[in-house]
Image (spheres, rainbow, N blue to C red):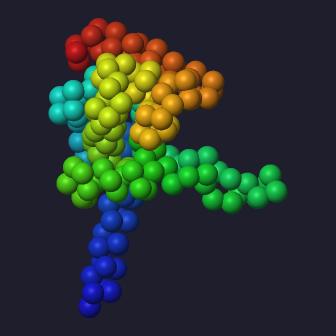
Amino acid sequence: MKYLNKTKISLVFIILTFLTSCTSPHITNTGNACTIFAQGHSFFGDWYQQTKTASDKYKIDMPILLATIKAESSFRSTAFSKRQYLLGIIPWGHISSAFGYAQALDGTWRLYKLRTGNVAASRSSFGDAIDFIAWYHRTSAMKAGINPHNAYELYLSYHMGWSAFAKSGPQGASPKLRQLAHNVAIQANIYAQQLRSCGYM
């Protein structure tokens, strides 16, 4: 009986994940925050309201949250980490367990659900992913003393992990990661200007 219950729960989870991915909005211009929010409507929610709720809850700017998702998954609900190749040609799994809008790892996602009580959270749900990113950034700000408006350092901590960032700080990041974080900061500024222009901020 217990086995059947677990099977039913797994089946429901698979169906919900499938339905979420099928109904996830297709964003035609991920570089424009106004377009993202205008097109970010689905049966499962309103992206503007979900982003604003997460921003207000954790005191992290909406443009930083959006810029993080753009860098991680380009707003694709079922994005995976890069593939590994055996002998350079045979697909052999993925380089990490990162998945979904936020590219959250299995272990970090479990910790998020445990700490927040959002036990039904799905990485392919925009609302859950944006809440996760806001939670992660707020935790980074508290753990490492990062200014919560500093998109550059928040993204470095997001990518490096709390322990690595606490140990080495921004200087411990690779040149490639520093450039990526710089791009995220620029994108956050662009998003902020756009959101003001179309009345979302």
Q: Position of residue 36 (x, y in %)?
A: 36, 27
Q: Is residue 31 visible?
A: no
Residue lying farthest to the front in this orientation? 167
Which residue sits at x=32%, y=60%?
Answer: 16
Residue lying farthest to the right in this orientation? 87
Which residue sits at x=21%, y=32%?
Answer: 58
Q: Nearer the viewer, residue 84 or 181?
A: 181
Residue lying farthest to the bottom in this orientation? 1
Q: Nearer the viewer, residue 160 or 197?
A: 160
Q: Is residue 53 above or below residue 184?
A: below
Q: Is residue 85 above or below residue 73?
A: below
Image quadrant where one finds the C terminus: top left
The quadrant holding residue 56 is top left
Which residue sits at x=33%, y=47%?
Answer: 125
Q: Position of residue 65 (x, y in %)?
A: 34, 29
Q: Nearer the viewer, residue 84 or 153?
A: 153
Q: Is residue 121 above or below residue 187?
A: below
Which residue sits at x=41%, y=39%?
Answer: 162
The quadrant holding residue 140 is top left
Q: Is residue 102 visible?
A: yes
Q: Position of residue 37 (x, y in %)?
A: 30, 27
Q: Residue 188 vs residue 167: left or right?
A: left
Image quadrant where one finds the N terminus: bottom left
Q: Is residue 62 above or below residue 161?
A: above
The quadrant holding residue 30 is top left
Q: Position of residue 11 (x, y in %)?
A: 35, 72
